[in-house]
Image: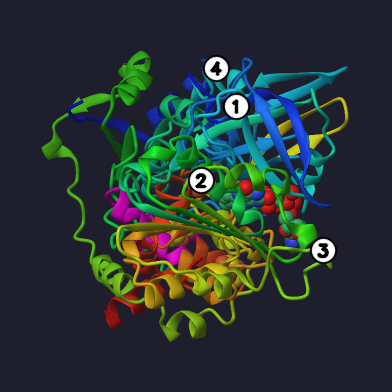
């Protein structure tokens, strides 16, 4: 008899303080990563403070660890925030569907991330970079409210090293510092300025709902992306991740089971319940 | 198993119940407490209240306890010890009998069972459900809140019962539908007299007020409709409808304990609470009580039936009987059917 709610203990291998309130935590189970696919999520906890739902932020092809990035916001996340290297995190997963790379192979890819929404984008993006030859041109657009709110600052240069790969980092107007050399402007505004075309391309967009709304509009209406070539994730509140607790549904769709990855076309057919 | 039919006198039924109690069965029956009637453990047949139509609460808590321990934890130094909560549940209910419940409550178990077993298997539920033996009594006089007939059951339905008792002329007929039911009466079989199906009084011709399929077809087409916002303006979001419901199964998971030890529990939760779907960002997909009661209706009459067969409602009427704002789900379902 298996207890589907029973977590495994993972060891914290490394903690990266990304911003004042976000961290990336690298974990190992039995000395390495676990089997998962980009876009999937897990339930993570400092036992005693409750579980939290996070997407994976690392490429599953990097086998030394698996990783998530989180913002401290409530009880469970404050608990995780207090942990140190070598401490244990309880983990169960992976759950949910994933970004289907078979539909992305051979195409130009556009990755658009806003704020903490960059975490799941990073996973699929690095997965594609790890198999760089399988894809056409790769454009990465990542924005945050201010320079201080940008995650992954230490690895932007690493992304830029790949061939035929453009990395554009932007901050909201007013969020720049005097020495800021990246773009200034909201993600959808900067997106519109890029010379992107919908044909033979796939766009992956994650971030706050308002950003997603405008980015989807630009991609569809201005750049001619087909709705089924625009892929995003929903982040409905979850508890079980197993299709039981009844919390995450949008109409008849259970985000924890049928999602969290959806195409813009699929979202269109859902009721306004997210 | 093919159904079997027995006759049993009122006197022998009392003997049967007292005998199984004497033989260490835990018998849960409608019983009076604090001026109301609830399902609870009885120690003699007389403690069962078989006249009440429905106890205040269903016996959902014997399948899905209000609070269930999923795991226990303790810390010693840097080590975390986790104890599987399932160990304590293994073999639960093995000698537990629900006696004198109604067909609607019996119908709820198999309906919930589907939720707990599509894809991932929830063995907490399964372990409790598979061992419970259910002996129900057919209803003679449903009240105005009841609508089991509309919900594909009936006041005399044996669906979900291991044994259904039907009262007739001072005695009872027992319709035994499962091995579990047969095993329960086997040791006391001299109290029963086997009979033919033809001897069991036929079910009455229970009339339906509306067709639930029409309620569904309204919901299929109308997510945005003023009806939801207008009709549920008076709803205060107390969640009583979901707590008293035998099929509502949504739950929350929380940790409770101190710095040394504690447990991870799941608790009944309610889609009628605003925080149920509140995102960390402050965004909430369901803002009004109209949005939330619509979710309740959608889940019961559309979403569940698309995934599985049947509906996530047995028509017991508890949510209506207990609602402080007198929101009657039968009336609502009928309104929707009329508008379809
Ligand atoms: C599929 C998916 C993927 C996700 N991926 C990520 C990710 O990669 N990174 C990330 O950072 N987040 C992610 N999230 C969001 C993340 O799950 C939540 O931010 C996190 O669970 C919050 O946990 P918490 O227990 O610390 O917060 P909680 O304690 O639940 O509190 C969160 C906020 O809600 C408020 N709140 C809580 N309870 C109440 C109440 N009863 N009444 C009023 N307000 C209340 C708190 O004050 C706080 O501001 C994801 C979510 C989903 C569904
Ligand atoms: S019992 Fe009535 S008032 Fe309370 S949440 Fe349910 S419908 Fe609303
Ligand atoms: S929704 Fe109401 S009538 Fe239907 S099973 Fe639940 S409590 Fe009974
Ligand atoms: S998170 Fe529990 S049903 Fe989806």
Find the distance from the CA under tag 4 to the CA under tag 2. Answer: 62 Å
Badge 3: chain ID: A
* Screen quadrant of the C terminus of chain B: bottom left
Find the distance from the CA under tag 2 to the CA under tag 1. Answer: 31 Å
Quadrant of residue A24 within the rendered picture = top right
Q: From this view, report whether residue B182 is shown above or below residue A267.
A: above
Which residue is disc 2 drawn over?
Answer: A125
Quadrant of residue B145 within the rendered picture = bottom left
Residue name at image x 53 percent, y 78 percent: B232
**Secondary structure beneath disc 4?**
loop
Q: Which percent across, then down, holds residue B202? A: 17, 48
Q: Is residue A83 visible?
A: yes
**First to last magenta residue range:** B296-318
What crowding class fits label 1: few (fewer than 14 Cα within 10 Å), some (14-19), or many (20 or more)? some
Residue name at image x 31 percent, y 31 percent: B8
Which residue is disc 4 drawn over?
Answer: B24
Q: Which comes before the other along the chain, label 1 or label 3?
A: 1
Badge 2: chain ID: A
Which residue is disc 1 drawn over?
Answer: A6
Choose mark 2 or mark 3, whichever is in front: 3
Q: Which percent across, then down, holds residue A119? A: 61, 48
Which residue is disc 3 drawn over?
Answer: A179
* Screen quadrant of the N terminus of chain B: top left
Q: Which comes before the other along the chain, label 2 or label 1?
A: 1
Q: From this view, report whether residue B147 is shown above or below residue B112.
A: below
Find the distance from the CA under tag 1 to the CA under tag 3. Answer: 48 Å
């Amino acid at each position: 008899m298996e207890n589907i709610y029973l977590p495994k203990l993972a060891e914290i291998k490394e903690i990266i303080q990304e911003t004042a309130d976000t961290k990336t935590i690298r974990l190992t189970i039995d000395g390495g990563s676990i089997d998962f696919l980009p876009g999937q999520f897990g339930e993570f906890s400092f036992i005693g403070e409750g579980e939290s739902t996070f997407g994976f932020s690392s490429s599953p092809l990097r086998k030394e660890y698996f990783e998530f990035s989180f913002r401290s916001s409530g009880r469970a996340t404050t608990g995780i925030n207090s942990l140190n290297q070598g401490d244990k995190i309880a983990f169960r997963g992976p759950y949910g569907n994933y970004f289907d790379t078979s539909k992305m192979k051979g195409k130009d890819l556009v990755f658009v991330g806003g704020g903490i929404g960059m975490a799941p984008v990073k996973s699929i993006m690095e997965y594609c970079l790890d198999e760089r030859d399988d894809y056409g041109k790769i454009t990465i657009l990542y924005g945050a409210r201010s320079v201080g709110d940008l995650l992954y600052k230490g690895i932007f240069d690493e992304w830029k090293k790949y061939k035929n790969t453009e990395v554009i980092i932007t901050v909201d107007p007013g969020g720049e510092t005097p020495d800021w050399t990246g773009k200034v402007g909201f993600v959808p505004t900067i997106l519109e300025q890029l010379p992107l075309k919908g044909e033979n391309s796939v766009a992956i967009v994650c971030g706050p709902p308002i950003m997603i709304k405008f980015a989807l509009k630009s991609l569809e209406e201005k750049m001619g992306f087909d709705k089924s070539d625009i892929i995003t994730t929903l982040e409905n509140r979850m508890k079980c991740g197993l299709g039981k607790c009844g919390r995450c549904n949008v109409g008849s769709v259970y985000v924890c089971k049928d999602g969290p990855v959806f195409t813009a076309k699929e979202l269109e057919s859902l009721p306004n319940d997210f | 198993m093919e159904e079997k039919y027995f006759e049993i006198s009122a006197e022998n039924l009392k003997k049967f119940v007292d005998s199984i109690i004497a033989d260490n069965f835990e018998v849960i029956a409608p019983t009076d407490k604090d001026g109301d009637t609830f399902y609870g453990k009885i120690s003699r047949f007389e403690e069962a209240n078989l006249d009440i139509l429905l106890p205040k609460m269903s016996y959902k808590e014997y399948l899905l306890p209000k609070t269930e321990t999923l795991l226990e934890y303790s810390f010693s130094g840097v080590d975390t010890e986790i104890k599987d909560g399932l160990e304590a549940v293994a073999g639960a209910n093995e000698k537990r009998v629900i006696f004198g419940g109604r067909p609607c409550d019996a119908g709820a178990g198999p309906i919930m069972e589907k939720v707990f077993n599509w894809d991932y298997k929830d063995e907490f539920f399964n372990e409790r459900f598979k061992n419970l033996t259910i002996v129900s009594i057919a209803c003679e006089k449903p009240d105005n809140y009841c609508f089991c007939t509309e919900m594909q059951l009936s006041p005399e339905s044996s669906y979900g019962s291991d044994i259904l008792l039907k009262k007739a002329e001072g005695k009872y007929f027992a319709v035994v539908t499962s091995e579990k039911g047969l095993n329960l009466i086997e040791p006391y079989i001299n109290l029963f007299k086997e009979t033919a199906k033809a001897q069991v009084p036929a079910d009455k011709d229970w009339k339906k007020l509306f067709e639930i399929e029409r309620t569904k077809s309204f919901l299929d087409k109308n997510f945005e409709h003023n009806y939801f916002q207008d009709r549920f303006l008076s709803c205060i979001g107390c969640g009583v409808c979901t707590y008293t419901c035998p099929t509502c199964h949504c739950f929350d998971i929380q940790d409770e304990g101190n710095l040394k030890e504690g447990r991870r529990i799941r608790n009944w939760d309610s889609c009628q609470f605003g925080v149920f779907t509140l995102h960390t960002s402050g965004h909430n997909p369901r803002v009004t009580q109209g949005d939330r009661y619509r979710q309740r209706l959608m889940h019961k009459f559309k979403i569940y039936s698309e995934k599985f067969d049947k509906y996530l409602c047995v028509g017991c009427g508890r949510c209506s009987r207990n609602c402080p704002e007198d929101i009657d789900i039968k009336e609502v379902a009928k309104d929707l059917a009329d508008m379809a």
